[in-house]
Amino acid sequence: MGFFDWLTGGKKSTPNPQPVQRRPINTIDLSGNPICASETCAQHVFKPEHTHCYTHWKIGETQRKEHARKMGRTVSSSRKRNYNRLISSSSTLLGKSIESCDEQTVLDCLTTKMGIHPGHAAAFTSSAAARGVIGWDPPIDKEGLENEGHEWTDFKGVRWYRSVSQPGPWTRHG
Ligand SMILES: [Zn+2]
């Protein structure tokens, strides 16, 4: 009796289905997997491709998110929604995607066609978060590869970098 039987018109389920038997997680033999990369940890990782055990992965994730928040490298979904609304209405007025337009063209559209205050329009087009959503710059919540205090990423065939420890936008390299 498969879970999707109802989709294919299969047999009706039995009145008292047997509970699913789950093997307790600690009886799975993980000894063939690598050891967690955390210095003091001797746990085998859950999957061969993992670098850390679940606990240490989780700790790393939490630290990573906290760091991104401190660096101002997060964009809330409501902010993204607002950007996308503005991008979509200006793209309609521009007759092409805002991403393919230069900044000045977009600024003109925002101020003259949409009646947006020039200060607000400039705040939008110069915001690293907005530029990432537009597609002009790499997304600010994109993670780069760390090398000697900088994060590096490839975006539109160009290398970009930013400091790991100081807030700031992605900068085009060369
Ligand atoms: Zn661990």
Image (cartoon, rainbow, N blue to C red):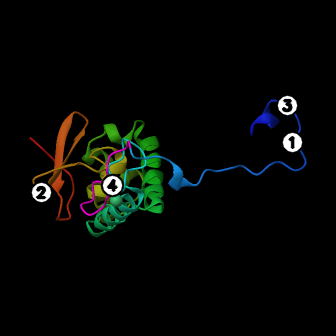
What SS does tag 4 mark? loop
- Number of other residues with Cα within 10 Å of mark 4, as a class: few under 14, some 14 to 19, many 20 or more: some
CB under 8 Å between callouts 3 and 4? no
Q: Which residue is mark 3?
A: 9
The C terminus: image quadrant: top left
Q: Quadrant of ligand 1?
A: bottom left
The image's mark for residue 149 is 2
At 37% from the left edge and 49% from the top edge, which residue is drawn?
133
Q: Disc 4, disc 1: CB below 8 Å?
A: no
* Dot label at residue 141: 4
Question: Residue 85: x, y in percent?
Answer: 48, 53
Dot 2: within a 10 Å radius of its alpha carbon, few (fewer than 14), some, or many (20 or more) residues? few
Mark 2 and ligand 1: say if the CB distance to the nearest ligand atom is below 8 Å. Answer: no
Q: Nearer the viewer, residue 145 or 117?
A: 145
Q: Between label 2 and label 1, give the one nearer the viewer.
A: 1
Mark toward the viewer: 3 or 4: 3
Query: Where residue 83 appears, x then y in whole percent?
Result: 42, 55
Disc 1 secondary structure class: loop
Residue marked by disc 1: 13
The numbered mark, 2 or 4, whose residue comes first in the sequence reads 4
Which quadrant of the view contains residue 121?
bottom left
Magenta residues, as a range?
32-42
Residue displayed at 47% across by 48% down: 89
Q: Amino acid at mark 2?
A: Gly
